[in-house]
Amino acid sequence: MDEAQEEALGPRAERTLGKASWDPQTSSLVGGAAIERSARNLDSARAHTIGPTRETPRNVIAPPASGKLKNIGAEWDDNLRLRAKVIKVSVDSGAPRPRESHHVQAGSSIAHTSLKTGPPRTVENLEMYSEVHNHLRLGSNGSTSFTTMQLNMCGAQGWGKLLSHSESMPLTDPNIVCSMKDMGRVGGDHFDSHDCKGLYTNTISWPDMPDDYEPGLFFLLFAKIYMRMEKHLAVNFSGLHKHGGSAPTAPDGTPLKGWETRFVLVSYPQNLMYNGSVRFPLFANPNNQDAVYVTPEMNYPE
């Protein structure tokens, strides 16, 4: 996981607190994290879906647009290999598998192991539910609890940001960064209304920042509890309950270095992948016209 995180973030000297931006002088993306400096990065927020998603008009579960190969015979590029490596490490169950890239490998292994530390009866029911619905597996065939993954990142903020609770108050300190806004909707308090009832979301915290920084908090608002997002923390919860977080913060009087980054992998169960209403592609037709699908009728015959 350390290797996957280092590769995804890239060298500190090339990193910035905000997301990657276009440099017209070099005609390339600069700053942000290494995984964001790619033409594949189509996300306006620093909340990147790196697992399967739903194509609403066609009612199909497929890779996100940023994770597709555009041409027949195209080779995987470095960004795709990086995404796969993150997923694998996060949710892979450790079951035998073909060779796959490290990023998908990283997040899935830890998420699956973390979930299995829960009550044995709950874990048994989750695995049984997964077998009954025969959903798309994330990371490896042994992963039974999650159907997709999101990578959330934000830079650290200066201590002065904590002194203001009003958007109308002018802040002139250059070390103050409203970094949680970079993650868009998930940067604030929210529900994940498309998660499947009865299943769990897993978050893995793997930040890169000095030890004396406040790593930021993760809130479960309905329970009125919070956790410090320290390195190696894994949390299992229902995304249908309101939750949120705060940005990592430098100590009072400490200037930001410019590379401190919160790095969180979120594995979660999409409801549409469990309720039998979508199609799953099996393979492409030989004539490159669409694909052969597993349809709802195949999983739920009447």
Image (cartoon, rainbow, N blue to C red):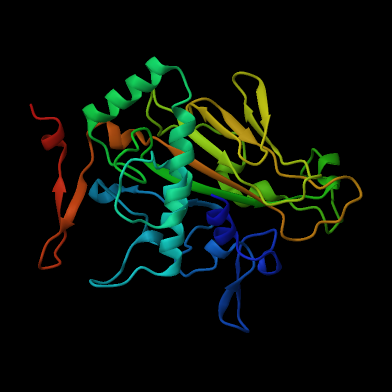
Q: Residue furthest bottom?
A: 25
Residue at (52, 44) in percent of width and height: 265
Q: Residue 195, located in which quarter of the rendered image? A: top left
Q: Is residue 291 left or right of residue 147?
A: left
| Residue 212 visible somewhere in the drawing | yes
Which residue is at the front of the view, 254 or 101? 101
Question: Can I make out residue 45 in this image?
Answer: no
Q: Residue at x 36, y 40 (%)?
A: 147
Q: Quadrant of residue 168?
A: top right
In the rendered image, which quarter is residue 173 located in?
Answer: bottom right
Q: Nearer the viewer, residue 234 or 38?
A: 234
* Rendered position, 5 above or below 146: below
Horizontal and vertical percent position of residue 206 = 61, 46
Query: From the viewer's perspective, is residue 31 above or below residue 235?
Result: below
Which residue is outermost to the right? 253
Which image quarter holds the C terminus?
top left
- Left or right of 256: which side holds 273? left
Residue 25 image point, x, y percent: 63, 84
For the point 66% across and 20% down, which residue is it?
224
Q: Residue furthest front?
A: 96
Residue 292 screen position, x and y as percent: 13, 53
In the picture, measured across the screen, residue 76 lies left or right of residue 2, that is left
Tell me the residue at 65%/66% (across/down): 11
Horizontal placement of 179 versus 87: left or right? Answer: right
Q: Nearer the viewer, residue 165 or 77?
A: 77
Count of numbered circles on the image: 0
Q: Position of residue 281 (x, y in %)?
A: 20, 51
